[in-house]
Image (spheres, rainbow, N blue to C red):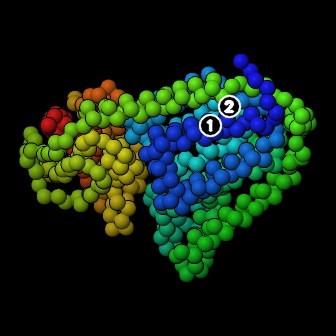
Amino acid sequence: MLTSRPPGRHWRGYLTLLIVALVVLVWIYRETAWSLVALWQRSETYAHGFMIYPVSLYLIWRERRYLGSITPCPSALALAVFAALGLGWMVAQSAGVQVVAQYMFVAMIPALTAAILGLRLARAIAFPLAFTLLAVPFGEIFIMPLINFTADFTVLALQLTGIPVFREGNHFTIPSGNWSVVEACSGLRYLIASLTLGCLYAYLTYRSRLRQLVFIALSIVVPIIANGLRAYLIVLLGHLSNMRLAVGVDHLIYGWLFFGLVMLVLFWAGSYWREDGPVTAKRKAAAPNGTARIAVVPPRRTAVIAVAALAIAWAPHAYLHLLERQTFNPAPAALALPQAIGPWTAVSPVAELRPSSPGAASTVMQEYRSGDRVVGIYIAFFRNQHQGAEAVSSRNLLVDGNRRSWSVTGESMRNLALANAPGSVRQSRLLRGTRYLLAWQWYWLGDAQTANAYRAKWLQAKQRLLGTGNDGANIVVFAPYDTHPSQAVSTMESFLADAAPTIRQSLQQAGEQR
């Protein structure tokens, strides 16, 4: 049954209901919510997350008179979307993909808003709701492509300038000194800051969807190109000053000043096509006049939707908690490799490669020799995988990045045709002074092997959701070579032909320990 109330008053019950529902939602997903805040606090790259929700609320507040004319009406369609997001969160959480779980949780907030207040109102504040997605700390996946682009751009620009360059991976040498394009040089901070400001500027300045999308696209492309130009100018400045300028913390200052100038020019150029005129006639006509009465849906019907939504939100969280209790293995992991595998005999380490696997329950590192061939193997076994301690993680490093350590000069995928071995491996070429090393990496999850990180995450989610376990391993096999990687390829193929069954058996035994 519909009731009739003056405009504005009918909102009180719905807002109270929405606020209570949102508070309960955040409490249910408090671990995911706290992981967002922790990243905002820990990383300057994502510190803008603290401002996203206040800005979004302000944008909604600007539309309060128009929103007051809209009749709140719960939406079953939005409730279905909300349920799908909850399932997505469950899969992402079981796979240990934190960023996807965070996106699912953040997207549940607009979906819950639409479920309680209705699709018409959600459309009216579509941008402020969508803007909250920028609160998710996202972008690590783009670091390596950005580093590679910046290195390519810098080297090409130096060559066009007439400066000779010798390049190995993302390290290059010019007559005046050595340079490296590292994570801090990727331009990810510039890109995130530009995208956030660009979305906000486009919404406030333009009314045309096309102009908004074009400006947002420019806010993505411009900082990427500008970062390459910034890196080139810093190297050029260091070169022309005989390595006295732009070689320390000052090059970071130059970089941010340059970025500020680029954004100023971008916004200045965008202002020529601005459409930030008055509120449209349609919204003016829809604004309440203070005397009209608006038909509303009784809050009790909306409360049913809210309770159903919270029950849906609680279900995947409770299911995962139940699975964790059933599959948790308290036994310590003991991983070991034999002293001899076929013709291969264990020897003292000579490669001095030290992969890093934080949170591993057990690790083993061993090198073997057969005649004049030497090969090494490293296995990190993860019991009861969880965030910060899992086989597939950006925290697991082949090299630690220390200047005295090995450096990665190239990566690719390589197919294998060996029994008991993975069908493909991730191949890395390593350099340390005048020494060369070739490394193959892959993952083991639930007795399945893969070098594809996405498939590995799916396998992790699958075995966890089916209650078949939650163990995994990161495996590295490596061999030195003198002139061509094919020497190491032959050595490692021969070793895996003999050792693959032993490796799988060792992992199975570690997983079966109770």
Secondary structure of the residue carrying numbered label 1: helix
Q: Indicate the quadrant containing the C terminus: top left, top right, bottom left or bottom right.
A: top left
Foreground residue among 134 and 318:
318
Amino acid type shown at disc 1: Leu
Mark 1 or mark 2, which has the lower sequence index?
A: 1
For the residues bearing labels 1 and 2, Cβ distance under 8 angstroms: yes
Distance from label 1 to label 2 (Cα)? 8 Å
Quarter of the figure that contains the N terminus: top right
Please determine whether, in this image, residue 247 is positioned above or below residue 89: below
Residue 109 lies left or right of residue 262; in this view the side is left
**Is residue 7 shown to the viewer in this render?**
yes
- The answer to whether residue 126 is visible is no
In this rendering, the answer to whether 266 lies above or below 511 is below
* Numbered-mark total: 2
> Which mark is drawn over residue 411?
none
Does residue 73 appear to the left or right of 107 in the view shown?
right
In the image, what residue occupies the spot 19% across and 52% down? 365
Mark 1 is surrounded, within 10 Å at the Cα level, by few (under 14), some (14 to 19) or many (20 or more) other residues, namely: many
Residue type, numbered disc 2: Leu
Residue denoted by label 2? 117
Q: Which residue is mark 1?
A: 18
User: In the rendered image, which quarter is residue 390 located in?
Assistant: top left
Which residue is depicted at the point 76% across and 29% down? 71
From what the image shows, is residue 278 above or below residue 461?
A: below
Q: Image quarter for residue 347?
A: bottom left
Q: Residue placed at 38% from the left, 62% from the top?
A: 401
Identify the residue at the far top of this view. 1
Which residue is found at the position 46% from the left and 45% from the top? Answer: 30
Q: Secondary structure at mark 2?
A: helix
Which percent across, then down, holds residue 161?
A: 64, 66
Q: Position of residue 337 (x, y in %)?
A: 12, 45
